[in-house]
Amino acid sequence: MTMLTVSGLSAGYDGRPVLRDVDFVVEPGQRVGVLGPNGGGKTTLFRVLLGELSPLAGAVSAPTRIGVVPQTERSRLDFPVSALDVALMGTISTLPWWRRPSRADRRRAEEALAAVGLSDLAHTTFGDLSGGQRQRVLVARSLVQDAPVIVLDEPYTGVDAPSAELLDALLAKLAADGRALLIATHDVGQTRHWERVLCLNRRQIAFGRPEQVLTTDVLEATYGGAVVELPDHRVVLPPHHH
Amino acid sequence: MFPSIWHALADPWGQAIDRRAFLEVCLLGVSGGVLGCWIVFYNLSYSAESLAHALLPGLVLAALVGIPLIVGGAIGVLAAGLAIAAAARVPAIGRDTAVAVVVTAMFGLGALLALSPATPPGLGELLFGDILGVGDGDIVAAAVLVIVVLVALRVMHEQLLVVAFDRLNARALGVRPGLVDALLLVLVALALLIAVQGLGNLLVVAVLVGPAACARALTHRMGPMMAMAAAVAVLAGCGGIYLSYYAGTAAGASIAATIVGVFCATRLVRVVV
């Protein structure tokens, strides 16, 4: 059973492709690390998956609802919403436009916050939470959406080590529950623990199991420069790609 | 002492003109305060002021032709909206410049028409408002506006929240940002059309932006913020009428000055506390 199929995809802006030849299949329970330099096409791919951008060529077969966990810096931190309000936003796609979230929807949002370990902070203003807590609230929002596929845009950026561990455990649990996750990241070492890795640099460089994909050749083709592999499997990328 | 305070407060209510003015500012205050919160969070304050100025040629034309001002104002807003949309499509111009150019042109056209010999006297009221001259029809229009604004904002509340909070991902959450923007602008245009007759072309934006800006400084939740903005607008509106009554100043300007005074006071409180 496949959750998401992308075949022969080209996408871009004003008719000019910025990403081409993308072919991959994601199954339930898989975490896919999406690697690539800035401008390599990660955001463009996500925009196509989320239906914000039409493909120039190729096709995407995806569930109706895809959850999204954006970088929290791109959310309005000055906006007067609580963590619960943000989680409740996940109900909108399941409701007709004239219906407001019911008590049952509110309960679902509270349960989602509990699932990400934030029950105690449900009424805290979103902008007052730490980076890691905000990421978890946005994950809760996609849980409320009941989305079988979730795309996460660099969720570890600006997150301290303990919060990153919590987020790691949470993503593992979501995958174990049968969801498919596409996670954009610059941390090559982290993707070694996930089920699949997709490397992009204006085209698809590689897709497959981490042990097949994460070779020096592939990483150099992905990042367009010499990469340094440390003994503990960590990889140092060319500086301008961070 | 208390009887004299009571008399000072009750005196303006003795006249039907002032009673209607109080009722009008209360109704406009509720719709303006609540709507203003979204105007502030959608960064639409400049657009709201621009739309208000764009009403002028339509209002003057309506006065010249003898049709209801609200019809003329609506034509003015529609013409400005179409002109801005057309100019904004030219890449070399851009949206911000398009708004500035179109609104300046519309306001200039309105001033030219207002200064022409054929124009009837009293057009200063279009610029500065005539809250003491509102009739029963104006009050009914303001009451309808309150209902429309409150119902529309209640129905659109979640969609407005999503777009304001996370515009880039709103579509993925099932909300169309363009549609929400358009509906909000329609509400703003409607509010301006109805409020402009009482508060004037130059001052109307004060009741839309000022109270919301005050409430934003004092609360951290949308619901209380909207309630507080409506309360500030109503109280400052009534305060402005008292000021006008006792100081002999123009009512519209007094209301705008009171709102600005409350805003400065809330900023001061925010800094001190």
Image (spheres, rainbow, N blue to C red):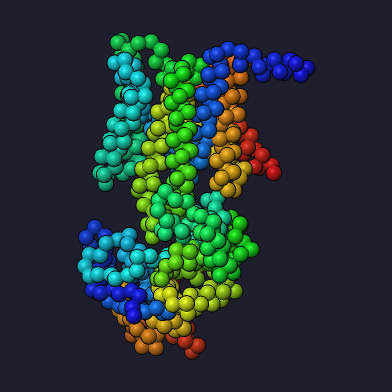
Above or below for B243 versus A205: above
Q: Where is residue A75 shown, x and y percent of the image?
A: 48, 57
- Quadrant of the snapshot with the N terminus of chain B: top right
Q: Is residue B240 visible?
A: yes
Residue at horizontal 30%, vertical 61%?
A: A53
Q: Is residue A193 left or right of residue A111?
A: left
Above or below for B212 versus A169: above
Of B17 and A206, which appears nearest the observer? B17
Q: Is residue A60 left or right of residue B131?
A: left
Of B28 and A39, which appears nearest the observer? B28
Quarter of the image for residue A129 reads: bottom right
Quarter of the image for residue B237 reads: top right
Of A105 and A238, which appears nearest the observer? A105
Q: Is residue B127 left or right of residue B223?
A: left
Residue at horizontal 39%, vertical 15%?
A: B123
Residue at the extreme right: B1
Q: Where is residue A139 shown, x and y percent of the image?
A: 49, 67
- Quadrant of the snapshot with the C terminus of chain B: top right
Of B272 and B184, which appears nearest the observer? B184
Q: Where is residue A42 shown, x and y percent of the image?
A: 36, 69
Above or below for B162 versus A57: above
Q: Is residue A86 visible?
A: no
* Number of numbered labels in the structure image: 0
Quarter of the image for residue A124 reads: bottom right
Residue at horizontal 52%, vertical 59%?
A: A104
Q: Where is residue A83 shown, x and y percent of the image?
A: 56, 59
Q: Is residue B147 left or right of residue A127?
A: left
Residue at horizontal 39%, vertical 39%?
A: B185
Above or below for A75 versus A206: above
